[in-house]
Amino acid sequence: MLRRRILTMELQPGAVLDEVALSEEFGLSRPPVRELMRQMAGEGYIELEANRAARVSSMSYQSLRDFFLLAPMIYITANRLAAENGTRGQLDVLKQVQQSFRKAVDHCDVEGRVFHNDQFHRQIGEMAHNVYLVPSLRRLQIDHARIGKVFYKHPNTPRMQEELELAAQQHDEMIEAIEKRDVDACGELARLHLELSRRNMAMYAAPEGLETPTL
C-alpha cells in the first residue's frame, strides 16, 4: 500500500512519512514499521537520513535527466532477457497484468494505469532472471511511475489518447514477442515504448512535486 501511494504520487516526492501514524493506520508496532522503511529505503522509495524524518524519495531535473540516460539500456536489456528466459507461468501472469492495465485505460482509472503499468514492466524484469538487472530496473520504475502519472493524467487531446492506446498496444506486442522468443523484436519494442513515454513526459516535465532547478 505504501509503495502504491508513492508510485501514484498520492504521497508526493519529499513528503514526510509519520512513523507513528503509519503504525496506527496498519495496526503495527513501530519496530516492523522501521524495518519496512529501511527496506523501502534500500529499494529507493524512501530517503533516510540521521536526525531527520523519513521522506518519500525526491525528484529533480537531474533525476529526470539521469532516468532518460539509463532507462533505455535497462528496459531494452530486461525485454531481451525476458524473451530468452521467461517461463510460461510468468507469461500468464504478464497477460493478467496487461488485462488489468487495459481495463484501467478503458475506465479512465489514472492510478490503475500507473500501478498496472509498473506491474507490467516489473514482471518483465522478473522474467529476465538476472539478479544484477532487477534492482536497477526497480529503481528506475519508481520515477518512471511518478513521471508517467503526468502523462496518464492528461490524455486530453485526440493525439494523446491515441498514444495512450499505442502504449497499451505495445504491451500486447511485447507479450507476443516474448511468447515467440523473439529477442530482437522485444528489445526494439522496449526502445519504442520508452521513446513514446519520453515524448509525452517532456510535454509535462514539471509535475507537482518536481524540484525546479536553482538558477
Image (spheres, rainbow, N blue to C red):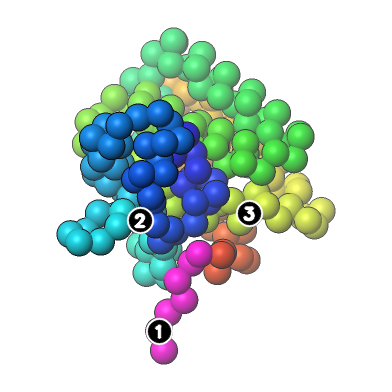
Give the residues in magenta. 209-215
Q: Earlier in the sequence, mark 2 or mark 3?
A: 2
Mark 3, residue position? 151
Decide whether the magenta segment is chiefly helix, strand or loop. loop
Q: How far apart are marks 1 and 2 (CA)?
A: 21 Å
Q: Tell me where residue 107 appears, x and y as whole percent.
A: 76, 34
What is the crowding at mark 1: few (fewer than 14 residues within 10 Å), some, or many (at least 20)? Answer: few
Question: As displayed, is residue 202 above or below residue 127?
Answer: below
Residue at the spot x=38%, y=50% of the render?
Answer: 18
In this picture, residue 194 sits left or right of residue 134: right
Looking at the rendered structure, the kind of residue marked 1 is: Thr
Q: Which mark is residue 214?
A: 1
Looking at the rendered structure, the kind of residue marked 2 is: Arg
Looking at the rendered structure, the kind of residue marked 3 is: Phe
Identify the secondary structure beneath mark 2.
strand
Residue 182 visible in the displayed image: yes
Q: Looking at this rendering, what residue extends furthest in the bottom direction?
A: 215
Q: Residue 55 carries which label?
A: 2
In this picture, residue 8 sits left or right of residue 63: right
Q: Tell me where residue 203 appears, x and y as whole percent.
A: 62, 66
In this picture, residue 209 sits left or right of residue 60: right
